[in-house]
Image (cartoon, helix red, strand yellow):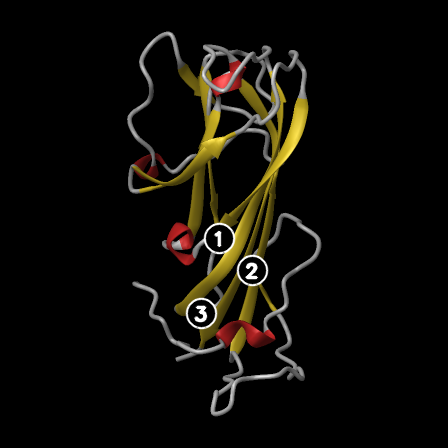
Amino acid sequence: MKRKNIFPVVASALLVFASAASSQQPTEVDAQPTERRSPPGAVIIQCPVPMNVNLTAPPPTAATPYAPDFPPPPSSPSGIEPNFGGTAINRHFRHTFTWKPLTRCCQYLRGKLTFTYKALIGGTSATSPNAGNDTWGIYKGTSVLASGQIYGSFPFSPGTTGTKTIPLTPAMLTGDRLSFLVQDDTSITSATLNVVACCVRK
């Protein structure tokens, strides 16, 4: 079902963002009133059913891409890396986090994707034909909604590791899933998804 914008004003004022990522189903959290300043005349609406999504992979080691979100697989010599912690170059990594909402009507408010990575080969610049030009992308319905460079400092050596955190918009979270892709000479060693939502019961 299409998610409705059920709280056009400050629906996120009383949501609690989970501090630790773990593999679990969305959880319902207490909506305790908090004291905060608001513009004169503003209406603060308490969320009936706050929801946090906190998911981590691996486990499982195998990636679980939702194929309709991604473009057709790249042709040779590139391929698809099926696992977290892959060791082969010229393979695109694809993974989709999926979850079940607490109710039939939820509005996703914000989120973040954090992944750790390792360069399988070195990189000399952001446009060099090695790991230096590798990028990440958030996909939905074969369209890229956001993308960016993985590496920001050059040159770097094989085995270089790092962590990337990407803020997520509600549009990226529609369909109760988040799909991302990473090129191509970079191994993704882990990924964590955190989402804040507000739901109602009908």
Q: Which mark is residue 183?
A: none
Figure check: 23 above or below 161: below
Front residue of 103/13: it is 13
Is the C terminus in the top left, top right, bottom left or bottom right quadrant? bottom left
**What amino acid is labelled 3 in the image?**
Thr
Does the residue at mark 3 contact the one at mark 1 (Cβ under 8 Å)?
no
Where disc 3 sits, the SS reads loop
Q: Which mark is residue 26?
A: 2
Front residue of 173/67: it is 173
**What amino acid is labelled 1 in the image?**
Trp
Q: Alpha-carbon neighbours of circle 3 within 10 Å: few (<14), some, or many (≥20)?
A: few
Where disc 1 sits, the SS reads loop
**What amino acid is labelled 2 in the image?**
Pro
Question: Where does the image place residue 138, in percent across and percent down from the top left?
Answer: 42, 40
Where disc 2 sits, the SS reads loop
Q: Is residue 58 visible?
A: no
Q: Is residue 154 visible?
A: yes
